[in-house]
Amino acid sequence: MPHDIRLIAVDMDGTLLDASGNVPETLWGLLPRLEERDVTFVPASGRQLATLRATFGDAADAMTFIAENGAYVVRAGVEVASDALEPAVVARAVQRLRRLSAEGYDLGVVVCGKRSAYIERTDEAFRSQAAIYYAALEIVDDVLAIDDDVLKIAVYDFALAEDSVGRALDEIAETHRVVVSGQHWVDIMNPGVDKGVALRRLQAALDVTPAQTVAFGDYLNDLEMLDAADWSFAMHNAHPDVVARARHRAPSNVDHGVITTIEDLLAG
């Protein structure tokens, strides 16, 4: 690998996954080649750990994951780092979101714990969206009554999140991270939690430098992760802010840009 690359962090939706939301078949042959070269391949996503593990099947046991937008880092089944929200913060955020729903915002709330994700809203329109990202998903009467470490609160907005609920959480954003993670998703996390912080923690655990790190992303929740890697790539389909922040460009996820770019790096 050029410049002694040892770590590759890859966003999932809009980056690694194809237009149908699937892992490109060519990745399965690429993973053992990276392992042979002592390169750690890390999916880095807003998705929960259970969903990432299900996506990578038999390979997952030995893999490293950055889940929940950086709030949970696991390597070969062992926790590297986690950052849970205080119960009072969870209550304040959920109550605010309930008020917004009562005011007419069309929202679905996912309280994301270590063991599972939890929802109260049960209609198929919302539940089908939540199920894409949360393989471990429980319907409960009250998300504030669960017994779990809450890593993140994810909000699905049937409008465009950046212009809707993303602008209605200013009070929470004064003390905690509120990040638009997709066209319809907003995540609420502890201050100092993002994919970049998680990647830097992983670099420290693996004794890897930013100069030895590659990162791929397409959306606003990927910005800090790109900052943590000297080899930062914005996908062709990326948000303009991501394009402006990254040092390099990659073909779109539809064109399997992550795979082709890594192959180019392997070839030197």
Image (tube, rainbow, N blue to C red):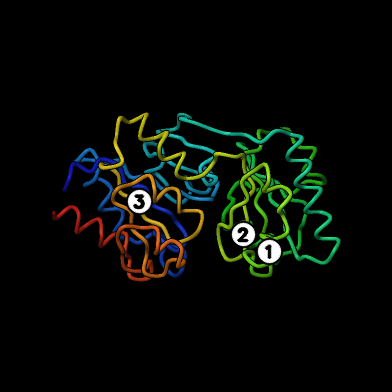
Can residue 138 be seen at all in this image of the molecule?
A: no
Q: Percent position (x, y) of residue 1?
A: 17, 47
Residue at 65 percent across and 67 percent down: it is: 163
Mark 2: amino acid: Trp
Residue at 41 percent across and 42 percent down: it is: 60
Q: CA distance from mark 2 to mark 1?
A: 6 Å
Residue at 65 percent across and 33 percent down: it is: 149
| Above-or-below relation of 258 to 77 | below
Q: Are marks 1 and 3 in contact (CB under 8 Å)?
A: no
Crowding at mark 1 (Cα within 10 Å: few <14, some 14-19, many 20+): many
| Above-or-below relation of 116 to 179 | above
Q: Which residue is mark 3?
A: 215
Q: CA distance from mark 1 to mark 3?
A: 28 Å
Crowding at mark 3 (Cα within 10 Å: few <14, some 14-19, many 20+): many
Q: Work out whether residue 146 or residue 239 is closer to the camera in this orientation and state it.
A: 239
Quadrant of the rendered image containing residue 59: top left
Q: Which residue is mark 1?
A: 157
Residue at 68 percent across and 70 percent down: it is: 159
Q: Which residue is mark 2?
A: 185
Which of the two labelled residues, at mark 2 and mark 1, occupies the earlier sequence position? 1
